[in-house]
Image (cartoon, rainbow, N blue to C red):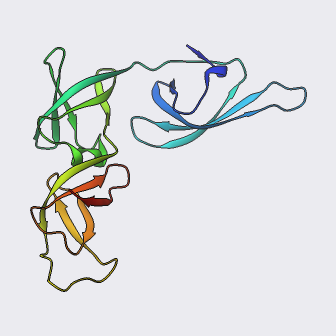
Amino acid sequence: MYNTSDIRKGLKIELNGEPYEIIDFLHQKYGRGGAHIWTKLKNLLNGSVQEYTFRSGEKIDKPDLVTKEVQYLYREGDELVFMDLETYEQMYVSAEALDKKAFFLKEGETNKVLIYNGQIIDINLPAAVVLEVVDTEPGIKGDTVSGANKPATLEGGLVVNVPLFINTGDRIKVDTRSFEYLGRE
């Protein structure tokens, strides 16, 4: 159990049977009354954000969260298959549950995942990954307009805007948080 004095940004708590991450908080003290801690919480299961106020001294539950090293094996329909590197047990998770993070997974790569009650709810990705361009319009010689972009489909299925000189088969670096082109590899 946590106490309200433990509240800080990034702390993961359990509230009403669901895991949350504290995005922001503010400690407020009014005259004679007790202190209150206003928090902005992100639901780790569905991504919704809500506000909640704790009274000073209130107890807060710890969620059953485990971080494990897993290897991404393959995609089976709408499900992603991972293997626990300690027990060699296969774990399935829907691509929807990981949102757009599923686009950055490569077969055979290892990643750390966040598991809640035996189910993968999040994956920890590096800040940028290198992916191959699978499909884009060919660059035309002489297209040197500054700042012009075109759509490109990457190996995971993600579509990003890239400069005109990028061609099919090029390897590019993409930011995993903003889904933007960072440069050519």
Query: Where is residue 66 shown, x and y percent of the image?
Result: 35, 20
Depicted 142 relative to depicted 152: above or below:
below
Residue displayed at 23% across by 44% down: 102
Residue displayed at 30% across by 61% down: 181
Describe residue 103's horizontal placement relative to residue 146 as left or right.
left
Query: Where is residue 180 shown, x and y percent of the image?
Result: 33, 59
Residue displayed at 30% across by 78% down: 148
Report the quarter where the C terminus lies.
bottom left
Depicted 127 relative to depicted 110: above or below:
below
Report the quarter where the N terminus lies.
top right
Which sits in the foreground, 28 or 70? 70
Depicted 98 relative to depicted 27: above or below:
below
Query: Where is residue 33 shown, x and y percent of the image?
Result: 85, 26
How many numbered discs? 0
Which sits in the foreground, 47 or 185? 185
Depicted 174 relative to depicted 40: above or below:
below
Describe residue 152's horizontal placement relative to residue 146 as left or right.
left
Q: Quadrant of residue 24?
A: top right
Residue found farthest to the bottom: 142
Query: Where is residue 129 shown, x and y percent of the image?
Result: 25, 48
Q: Quadrant of residue 165?
A: bottom left
Residue displayed at 14% across by 83% down: 141
